[in-house]
Amino acid sequence: MAILQLDQSSAVPYPGKVFVIRDRIHSRAITLIDGTLKLMDDSNATGNCNWACIETDIYFGFCNKASKCYIGHNGRGKVICAAAKHDSHESIIARPHPDGGYELLMSHWGNKLLVGIAEDGESLIATDQEGVTWDFTVVST
């Protein structure tokens, strides 16, 4: 049996903590800018990239500290931040990846979708194809 060792460069997502969530390749943060999620260099971000982790029925929810809205999907492949409560479209599983970081999985009609990066390189998508691995950095507890 193989043993999965967690990469220590990424914090473990856990309820009650606040995180910056970055893609592992470019180290850009999931940032809310004028109601739209984008990947941005968080040191230059004009939006908010701090996400409070909560848990409901074993699923995580990531709530933007400024807007109080949750990361979710719109049912048509786009990852958004619009819901004021943690419901099924905002339910996320953070699955450790063998190469480090975490995959973010979202539920849609019994299927699991991976959070990935759109072709524009900034927007986020919910896809049944290959997703992206993410690093979590604790901002506060």
Image: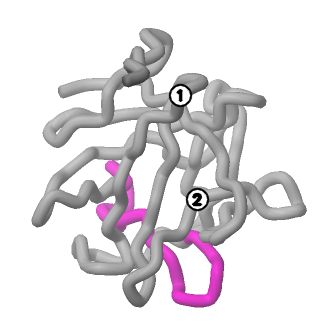
Q: Amino acid at mark 1?
A: Pro
Q: Is 69 situated left or right of 44 in this image?
A: left
Residue under the image location 57 percent in, 49 percent down: 31
Inspect this view and state whether residue 44 appears: no
Whether the magenta-drawn stretch holds residue 69 is answered as yes
Dot 1: element = loop
Predominant secondary structure, magenta span: loop
The residue that disc 1 covers is: 98
Q: Is 48 situated left or right of 64 in this image?
A: right
Tag 1: Cα neighbours inside 10 Å, few (<14), some, or many (≥20)? few
Q: Amino acid at mark 2?
A: Val
Q: Is 93 situated left or right of 100 in this image?
A: left
Instruction: Pinpoint residue 123: horizontal percent, then vertical percent.
Output: 73, 62
Residue 87 in the image: above or below residue 93 = below
Q: Which is more foreground, mark 2 or mark 1? A: 1
The residue that disc 2 covers is: 115
Residue under the image location 58 percent in, 59 percent down: 115
Magenta region, residue range: 64-79
